[in-house]
Image (spheres, rainbow, N blue to C red):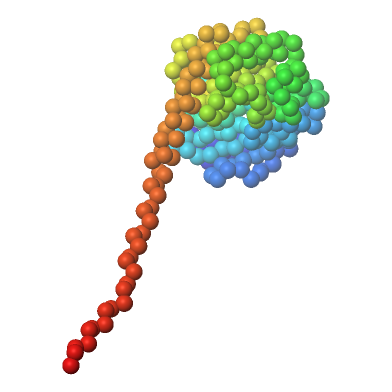
Amino acid sequence: MTSFEDAREALRRTIRAVYPAAKPIEGWAGVETWGVPRPKHAVEKVTSGTYDPTRITIGIADRKSGPVVYFLDPGDYHALETHRALLTGAGFKLGRGCIMHTRKGPLPVDALETLFRRTKARDAAARPRAAKASGARISAAPSVDAYLAALPADQRAALERLRKQIRVAAPRAEESISYGMPAWRHEGPLVYIAAFRDHLSFFPGGTSALQTLKDEVKEFQTSKGTLRFTPARPLPAALVRRIVEMRVAENEARAARRKARTKKAVKKPARAPRKKPAKTAPRKAARRRS
């Protein structure tokens, strides 16, 4: 495993070679961060999350496991998953928005350079007003119906089917737009769905359901808390029902525990202080008869 100083210098050279306009920016504590400006025509009007749509953010930090490279790409929220084969083949271990170098030897900057160049080429070829094609980032949609109406026909049909399956599995859940995506709530956030350029996503609102059903979801591309599919290969109705029912049970159990804690924390009303008996005037001593 390379030293952090060597890894940082190698990454700096690679960034400068691919992105001459990259500049150091303020990032997170302990992370050296660069901002890479994106072409104006590739920038979408509205994005959700913490990404800045006008730039790609690249950082590096020194961790116990080795150098960690951060790559936050607003043009593709799943950029690292999209290029998983490239990065894992070079010896990286992928995390959520980060690329960990855990093997001995220098930082595999060749794979990083390929990732950067692919991203740069994608942005250069992007069509103006790409937000209409991304679906999930049209956060101004006032309702789920409006959100779905803005999608291509195949994506709309696939998400309408998924919407009906969620309603069957959670008939009491409330439907709304949250974080720019169709969302359902039942005793708290339940599940989300979204459309992206090259895939659709189903967000179960946590990782427990996907971990429990890992054998059933292994045929689909997954990441932490996300299940991805396409209109040509939709999620099985039985799988959707199981996930939603598990999430309903989780939320109801959490709500019950919360209510129990609240009830236990409520103090019994204090008793009213006892009234002290009114003091009576001392009896005057009877005068002795002379």
Q: Is residue 193 left or right of residue 38?
A: left
User: Which residue extends farthest front?
Assistant: 290
The quadrant of the image that shows the C terminus is bottom left
Image point 77% across, 22% down: which residue? 132
**Residue 281 at x, y percent in the picture:** 31, 77
Which residue is at the front of the view, 258 or 209? 258
Q: Residue furthest bottom?
A: 290
User: In the shown orientation, is residue 102 left or right of residue 120?
Assistant: left
The quarter of the picture where residue 39 lies is top right
Residue beneath the point at 68% across and 38% down: 35
Q: Residue 230: image x %, image y %?
A: 64, 11
User: In the figure, residue 231 lies in which quadrant?
Assistant: top right
Q: Is residue 138 visible from the viewing direction of this image? A: no
Q: Is residue 176 above or below residue 279?
A: above
Describe residue 90's horizontal placement relative to residue 266 as left or right.
right
Judge by depth and name the residue closer to the eye, 256 or 209.
256
The mark total stands at: 0
- Counting from the top left corner in percent of width and height, residue 234 is at 61, 9
User: Which is more toward the observer, 261 or 110?
Assistant: 261
Q: Residue at x 45, y 19 (%)?
A: 211
In the image, residue 6 sits, relative to residue 80, either above or below, namely below
Q: Position of residue 171 (x, y in %)?
A: 57, 17
Task: Tell me what residue is drawn at x 64 percent, y 10 percent.
Answer: 161
Q: Is residue 231 above or below residue 206?
A: above
| 116 and 163: which is toward the camera | 163
| Residue 205 can be seen, yes or no | yes
